[in-house]
Image (tube, coloured by chain):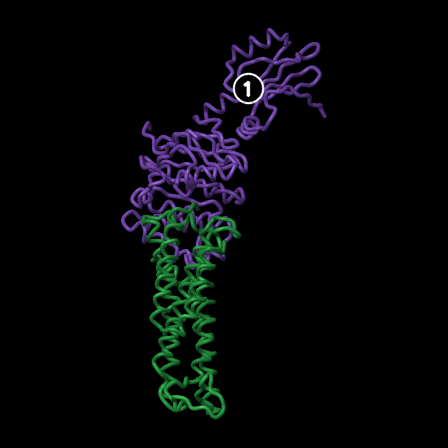
Chain colours: A green, B purple
Amino acid sequence: MLLRKELRESLPCILLAAIALLIIGGIALRLEMRSGRSGWYYSNLSPGATANTYSFRQLSSLSIAGSWLFVISIALGLGLGVLHFWIPYFTRTWPFLLHRSVGKMTILAAKLTAAAIGCILPLGVVWLALYWYACRSNAFGIPVPVRVFIDGLILIALGLVVYLGTALAGLSRAKWYTTKIFGLTFAALVLFITTVQFQCGLLWACVIIVIGIMILLSQVVDTFLKREY
Amino acid sequence: MNEIVLETQGLTKYYGSTLAVDHLDLKVPRGCICGFLGRNGAGKTTAIKLMLGFLAPTAGSSKLLGCDSTALTPEIRQRIGYVTEGHRLFRWMSIAELERFQRAFFPEQWDKTLFADMIEYFELSRKKKIKHLSNGQRAQVSLSLALAPKPELLIMDDPTLGLDAAIRRQFLEGMIELIMRQGRTVLFSSHILADVERVADRIAVIDKGVLRANCSLEQFRTAVKKVIFSFANSVPTEVDIEGLLHCRRSEKQLELTLVGTEEAQIAEWAKSAGAEEYHVAKMNLEDQFIEFTAPANRKKLFQWEEQ
């Protein structure tokens, strides 16, 4: 019941993000197919030079959609975090919500689960649909690599990091210029390191995200259980 | 009647350097309706939140149904009803949805019939969303939600705040309905004295975080009195009588507000001060409360001009 309530409250944000990604991604794909300008690029190729064609990177519309996925995922994480832990409209119901025959941890778990489902599932499904459409359409010379799809999933996971950072900042009773912004600062740091690590390999990016989520999650749980309402 | 269901011992809460609740020692016996009175900012909401474990005390402790407030288990919470200040419910839910939500946490004790009866009594439509309800209607829903699980202890934080007289009466009648059931205990904060007078059998008065009275309503009504002394000549400049709260004087009259002063003591003082006559003025609970919690120079003698 708690989970259903949280999902229902988060639904407008989730739908908005999923629809935005679907529209922007869809438009990018359609434009690509119409113009037939799918191509390949090599970042440091000078005139007359030779290059290994396997090092060429595909400049597809999915890369453009990927940039938008990054923005939308972060916006969704931020939106859900603000919705759950910042807006007085919801936070004023804390006493009513907390006086239940379940522990505080169950209430928090419902919020976090709703956020995880909200961040990952809708964007993941839309991203999968876009990838599937790009693979089966004839716009591209060769099949779009799976890596593009996996990159997208990592970007989606970053939304969860931002959600946890926002939640931690929202729960903190400290002044904004002290430790209150720790959550958001830490999330920003994780975003930065992850985007840098993309160049080095997916594994490192995943490791950083997992570590980031673990640290933020433990802080959120601890703050929620100790906080006054 | 002697079993204590709510007890605080030296309960203290500081917000930074501000003292909100100061060594609160309160006991509420089972089966009574206790009005928790105090002016705005007296510390009522803070005290209630401390009792329910939403705030951590700076010092002292509090127990509800024998369980420490800081460690209230879900099982104990199930036995306590709580009506929040301002009746903050989930605005997007309809009354029916809210009932389903609340019922899920009290599966065995939820009284479907009682909830339905109350909603009907308050003439509310189950389909209506909370955001479309007036303040008064939200209060009614809030009370119905708190009463339907048949709580042993019901705690209400200023439940009638912002409601008009008719709705307040209806709300209180709903509450009395619950009290008729044996063994229920209610603690409700309010600053509407007429409401308290109508339903409470005990009162606890809190003033600037300090508990100033915790007794039966009848005891309070008897204890706080205003006595007007008439003098042939000038009134005495010094007043020294036990239980003096306030003192006002005009040219030939002296008005004393006293607490707990015996009739014999008043008569004795009147004689020694040379008063021609004296009489006890009628006071309603509101007058008594205002006099009892009036701020500052309560022991000082000050002049007042008759209009």
Say whether residue B27 is left or right of residue B269: left
Q: Residue furthest front?
A: A49
> Eyeballing the image, is A23 above or below B292?
below
Say whether residue B225 is left or right of residue B70: right
Q: Amino acid at mark 1?
A: Leu
The residue located at (37%, 43%) in the rendering is B81
> Eyeballing the image, is A22 above or below A114?
below
The residue located at (35%, 73%) in the rendering is A202
> Eyeballing the image, is B48 above or below A43?
above
Q: Splitting the image into 4 quarters, where does residue B237 fall?
A: top right
Q: Please tell me whether mark 1 sits on a helix, a strand or a loop.
A: strand
Q: Front-most of A59 and A132?
A: A59
Q: Front-most of A179 and B4?
A: A179
Number of numbered markers? 1
Quadrant where the N terminus of chain A sits is: bottom left
Report whether residue B92 is seen: no
Q: Front-most of B167 and B297?
A: B297
Label 1: how many Cα within 10 Å (few below 14, some 14–19, many 20+): many
> Eyeballing the image, is B253 above or below A25?
above
The residue located at (50%, 36%) in the rendering is B20
| Residue named by callout 1 | B258
Q: Front-most of A139 and B44?
A: A139
Q: Position of residue B278 (x, y in %)?
A: 60, 13
Q: Position of residue B179 (x, y in %)?
A: 37, 37
Report whether residue B155 is seen: yes
Q: Position of residue B154 (x, y in %)?
A: 38, 40
Q: Position of residue A63 (x, y in %)?
A: 44, 80
For disc 1, the chain is: B
